[in-house]
Image (cartoon, grey):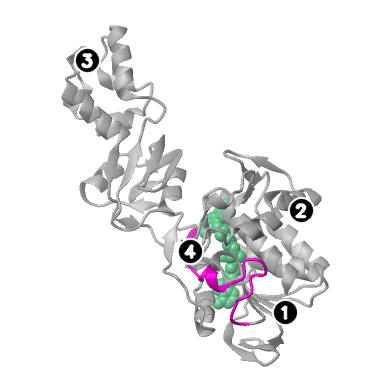
Amino acid sequence: MVIIGGGAAGLMCAATAGQRGKTCLVIDHSNKLGKKILMSGGGRCNFTNLEIEPENYLSPNPHFCKSALSRFTQWDFIAMVSRHDIPYHEKTLGQLFCDNKASDILNMLVNECETHNVITKTHCTVESVDKQPDGFQLKTNQGEVQCQSLVIATGGLSIPTMGATGFGYTIAEQFGISVSQRDAALVPLTLSGHLLERSQSLAGVALDCVVSTAEQSFSESMLFTHRGLSGPALLQISNYWTLGETITINFLPKNDIRALIAQWHEQKLKQNIKNLLTQYLPKRFISVWMSDEVANKTVNQLTELDIQELEKNIHNWSITPAGTEGYRTAEVTRGGINTDEISSKSFQAKNTEGLYFIGEVLDVTGWLGGYNFQWAWASGYCAGLHV
Ligand SMILES: Cc1cc2nc3c(=O)[nH]c(=O)nc-3n(C[C@H](O)[C@H](O)[C@H](O)COP(=O)(O)OP(=O)(O)OC[C@H]3O[C@@H](n4cnc5c(N)ncnc54)[C@H](O)[C@@H]3O)c2cc1C
């Protein structure tokens, strides 16, 4: 068998198939295997999550991911990590990171492959793929290769400088398999006009928030940037956001500003609102977010209209982002190969025997927090068991 793409899913598939005694060649056009693993999780690889549910994945067919996620779970991957004595810790929200370096995970996968005699070829570009009666013929810059099974594990489009290409989508189309619209996801959102000016003046300010689209909400931290909005909450919502849609941000999700004002009123506090709020929100945020007129009022000087304005700006800031930062900074690609045309058990294309698609190239997108790697491990494992 040949696997095109020596990233997370491809290496997992190779290790699994190798263990079954299959002759396995992994081809990658990059100079190194698993580059995204190395750069992931800020260099520490958030390799899975303690709580993996199908609901953590976006896909037009929400059932598609269920089988693989239940056949190769986070516990299976954690067991593998433990077998290799890789130290790890939970950072937040069930997210597991290496204590040392992301290379621990890559080395583990490469070791598993080597143990099972998997051959890997980097700097290898596939020029064409042709279906033969008994398999496939590949023309590469390093010669021709024949195989019975061909696994496409070329990932998504994010970070082209790390070797991302649309190769998997092109192969799908060549074999008559449809590919849905692709967009950058888990990506910072950009702003324009006065919203951008506001964000720029707060660049570097982080705060906990709840950010929502019409269908989904996330409660995590966010960050103002020179281009717009980023941080975990914004990356999460970017998975659900489409151009032209409004998002709403609650900057003070654990308190109710109206209740706070009533409480300060009862306590007969004499400070101005700006000072009272510093217990709850960053000073720089308050100075930009509130008009001087309201900010300098004391509690008993506030009118009902002032309170309504505060409620709107603090709990219910509704904006339409200008766009996203695109594939240059996106962690993943939303959309991809139509899962209706792929078996959810074996990952084989329903219309072409021997042709498999795994990992991010499929139209399955995980949340931020180790979910995308878990999808790569699970789909790679299932295909590796079947080829
Ligand atoms: C900066 C960053 C940080 C991330 N951090 C995390 C994280 O901490 N946790 C998490 O769960 N997810 C994270 N992700 C997402 C995660 O890396 C991907 O979802 C995952 O790597 C997908 O696995 P894959 O095997 O499908 O694709 P990849 O791992 O991207 O592997 C695809 C491979 O195919 C090769 N390839 C591409 N085109 C060709 C071609 N034409 N010919 C030959 N080879 C080709 C590439 O060189 C690459 O090696 C992060 C992504 C980025 C960009």
Res. 125 visible in picture: yes
| Mark 3 Cβ inside 8 Å of ligand 1 | no
Residue 189 on the magenta segment: no
Q: Amino acid at mark 1?
A: Met
Q: Closer to the camera: disc 1 or disc 4? A: 1
Mark 2 vs mark 3: which is more N-terminal?
A: 2
Q: Amino acid at mark 4?
A: Ser
Distance between mark 2 and mark 4 Cα atoms: 27 Å
Mark 1 vs mark 4: which is more N-terminal?
A: 1
Q: Which residue is mark 2?
A: 80
SS of the residue at dot 2? helix
Q: On the picture, is 386 further left or further right than 272?
A: right
Q: Which residue is mark 4?
A: 158
**Disc marking residue 353:** none
**Disc marking residue 298:** 3
Mark 4 vs mark 3: which is more N-terminal?
A: 4
Res. 276 visible in picture: no
In this picture, which residue range is highlighted in magenta? 332-352
